[in-house]
Amino acid sequence: MSTSILTDNQMDELEREIRSDPIKWAYWKLKDPKGNPWKARWYQKKMIYGILNGDRRIAARMGRRVGKTETMVVFCLWYAFHHKNSRLLVATPYEHQVRLIFMRLAELVRDCDELNASVSMTKNPFIASFGNGSKIMGFTAGANAGSQAGASVRGQRADWLFLDEVDYMSRDGIDAVTAIAMEDPKRIGIWVSSTPTGKRDFFYDICTNSNTGYKAYHFPSHVNPDFDEKLEGEMRATMTVQGYIHEVEAEFGEETIGVFSKTAVERAKSQYLYSYRELNLWEQEQYKKQGYTIDDIVFHPEYTVRNPAPDAHRIVGVDWDKYAEATQIVVTEFDEILKKFRVAKRYEIPRGDFTYDHAVQKLIEINDIWDPKFFYIDAGHGEYQIEMLRKHGLENPESGMLKKVKRVHFSQTLEIRDPGTREVDKKDVKNFMINQTSILLDRDQLVLSPFDDMVWKQMMDYQVVRISQNGKPIYTSENEHALDAFMLTIMGFTLEFPNITKILEEIKVARKALPFQNTTQESLQQKVFGGHRDVYKPLKDKPEREARDNPNWHLNKVSVGYGKKKNASGPWGRGASRSTGFGRAKF
């Protein structure tokens, strides 16, 4: 329609309609990187129109080169320009990501006369100020956990919160940013976007659980109209398998920097629904939403000194952290029915003035309740406690704690005999117990309670932080104490009961020395030449009958070559009785 025939009122109405629609306004005012009018793709329209229709919690799981950041930037410009005194906060894990977002904001503003006349931008701090009093502000929320994660964003007010690449953000940072919305949850919107890393944390929860209140979108790189076979081939050639799953398909897959298989952890906590504590009403309601009932859950009794647990192979693991987190104690037992290793109980000693003394008394009580075979105790902060427990065992021989308590320092080494090569190798304790836990997890030999998320969530989040100069992996050192206690029990089972774990070969010391005759050469001669006889000597001493002497000569079996011979000793003599040797084939 030609604008020349429209009245002023119709022009005002048309402009009002365009400005009320971010997609139409962007096409009218903004330019894409090639200088053409900015045109939204179908999935970008779907997300923005969802917001206009009332969505206030957005979780966008998008692949590479789809335009997730572009969509967010365009919406920010439209909202800030058309809503007076609004505040839009953008948070990313790293500063260079905030810088890239504000670079794109500056490009769009520069190519739009209307915005260029209204917006001023600064880089330290990252702020885009509009003439109507609105601001777009950029912050870093941190990729590592710590007290400073998200500190810069605390106390800010906002109309919209944007968390970009949230799956690389620490949980502390996420909590600090999203807490702003608690001021007015119905008014303040939260836009979360990222390519998945495989972590089963905040981003995974809001993308897979509708009860979190987030509207989830999933757009792999294939939705990009420019995605073709050439681009796909390039990405497959330059990425690992998991990298392609994360970056292109936008699927969670496995965590590339994670230690334990996420799918294996999911199996470990879902194969047996049991709990060693009562569930509160909120927990019961949450599991009802997932299709479970209380009758589906097996509640194990609360064992006490007066009502001790029945006999079983059990090991207790203890990890100390007096100044940061609570002391964690995990009781793991070999379940004779499941034939698997199951977390039977987890205890927590809150930090306080007498944390270590309370923990020692608790371990003495645990010994009376569970009668474990061994206590594997972290010696990093536990030298005093180990001495007190052994002293108790000396004064109370019936407790057995003098022999049960095992001191473990994560920096020490163990001498382990390789079951294949029979060579003794030195292993770092930390790496060794992680590897043994991973092996049993992959074999589906571990059972975790889904109703105690301390162990399995820490297992999900456990990562290799970096590789040291000597090539050793450095693991997560925060929020992992319950997992360390559990892994200590697995190491205990591996070392003390190798016949159960079947990971290591138990070393058996010989009591007698017997002579051994090597029959390899004789066996080979027997196979090839028929023993020590002369090669030209007939196999049989008696003369062979001629055909005319035997009327049934045509029915005799004659050797024609070599074939497999059953129930014979192997070609290499001793130790190969199950192998099939070779004998002369007959016809």
Image: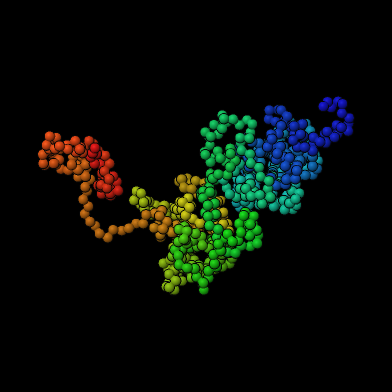
Residue at position x 57%, y 45% in the image: 198
Q: Quadrant of residue 513?
A: bottom left
Q: Is residue 587 visible?
A: yes
Decide which of 236, 163 is in the foreground and name it: 236
Residue 379 visible, this angle: no
User: In the orientation shown, which residue stands out farthest toward the front?
Assistant: 551
Colour mapping used in the image: rainbow
As drawn, is 502 to the left or to the right of 122?
left
- The residue located at (54%, 45%) in the rendering is 254
**Residue sitting at x 46%, y 63%:** 314
- Residue 577 pos. (x, y %): 28, 49
Q: Is residue 35 above or below residue 327?
A: above
- Residue 291 image offset from top left, x and y in percent: 62, 55
Q: Horizontally, is 416 left or right of 149 in the view?
A: left
The C terminus, quarter of image: top left
| Quadrant into which the N terminus falls | top right
In the picture shown, does residue 570 fall above or below 16?
Answer: below
Pinpoint residue 438: horizontal percent, then vertical percent: 47, 51
Q: In the depicted view, which residue is nearer to us: 251 or 418?
A: 251
The answer to whether 246 appears left or right of 586 in the picture is right
Q: Is 481 located above or below residue 356 in the figure?
A: above
